[in-house]
Amino acid sequence: MNAGIRLFLLLLLCPQLAQAQSFLEQFSYEGLRLSGIGVEFGGVASDRLTREFSGAVRVDYGRIAPKVRVLVGASYFKGEFNATEIQELALGIQRVLVPPMSSIIDIGTITWSNVEVDLDLQYVLEIGGKVTNYIGVGFATHIRNGTGTIIDDTFIEDALDTIDAGVNLTFGTAFELIPEMQFTIDLRGGLTSELRTATARAGFMYRIAGR
């Protein structure tokens, strides 16, 4: 009976194992090579900062599977903490003072700059050879620096100077202008432990001939 059960399980799992192996065989490092360089400009909104201008650089490093490409990128933006965040921070400082102050502290304007370096895997769907749609997921490292007239050289500035990990979800479209140049539209959502962002950018991607 045990031998029969093992045979039944083997027959049941063989098709699934074969499909999994066939799927994994699509992935290869042979297609990884510099394939394009692009720049993007747009705006970023977040749950804690004001809406600000943002720029990015993207490097297409080729295909790791027939429809999956690898992109490495870097972006930057700098925004001010919104009124709600400033008020909560001022109240928090007021509570820890000894003796406590009766009025809310004026801590002025605080800015937070963010440098992001990310690695994306994008599933590519080409439409008619001229239009390319893609959806991707990625992992990022965020380097942030806090500044402000009142908080400079204080423990608050130290708390805002952080390095954080995050994940990205990307939707985009690229339109071929000429064989070596694409116009790109990129929508990106980012999530970290300290900040949630939504970014919309447009730009150009130079494609290396033959790649």
Image (cartoon, rainbow, N blue to C red):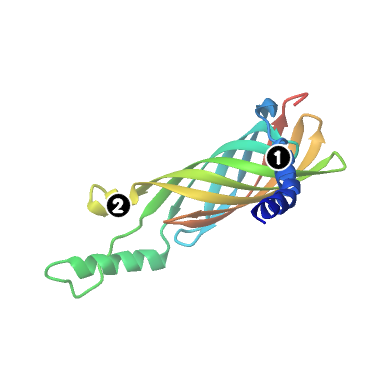
Q: Is residue 22 left or right of residue 72?
A: right
Q: In this view, does 200 lie above or below 29?
A: below
Q: Visible in this render: residue 63?
A: yes
The residue under the point 74% across, 45% down is: 19
SS of the residue under disc 2: helix
Q: Visible in this render: residue 173?
A: no
The residue under the point 23% across, 51% down is: 154
Q: In this view, does 157 lie to the left or right of 168?
A: left
The foreground one among 17 and 120 is: 17
Q: What residue type is labelled 2?
A: Ala
- Give the x, y percent position of residue 23: 72, 41
The foreground one among 122 and 26 is: 26
- Give the x, y percent position of residue 90: 29, 66
Q: Quadrant of the N terminus?
A: bottom right
Q: Is residue 87 above or below residue 201?
A: below
Q: How crowded is mark 2: few (under 14 residues within 10 Å), some or many (20 or more)?
A: few
Q: What residue type is labelled 1?
A: Gln
Which is nearer the N-term, disc 1 or disc 2? 1
Q: In which quarter of the image is the C terminus?
A: top right
Q: Quadrant of residue 179?
A: top right
SS of the residue under disc 1: helix
Q: How crowded is mark 1: few (under 14 residues within 10 Å), some or many (20 or more)?
A: few
Residue position marked by numbered label 2 in the rendering: 159
Query: CB atoms at circles 1 and 2 under 8 Å apart?
Result: no
Q: In this view, does 123 lie to the left or right of 105?
A: right
Residue position marked by numbered label 1 in the rendering: 21
The foreground one among 197 and 65 is: 65
| Alpha-carbon span between mark 1 and mark 2 | 48 Å
The foreground one among 20 and 135 is: 20
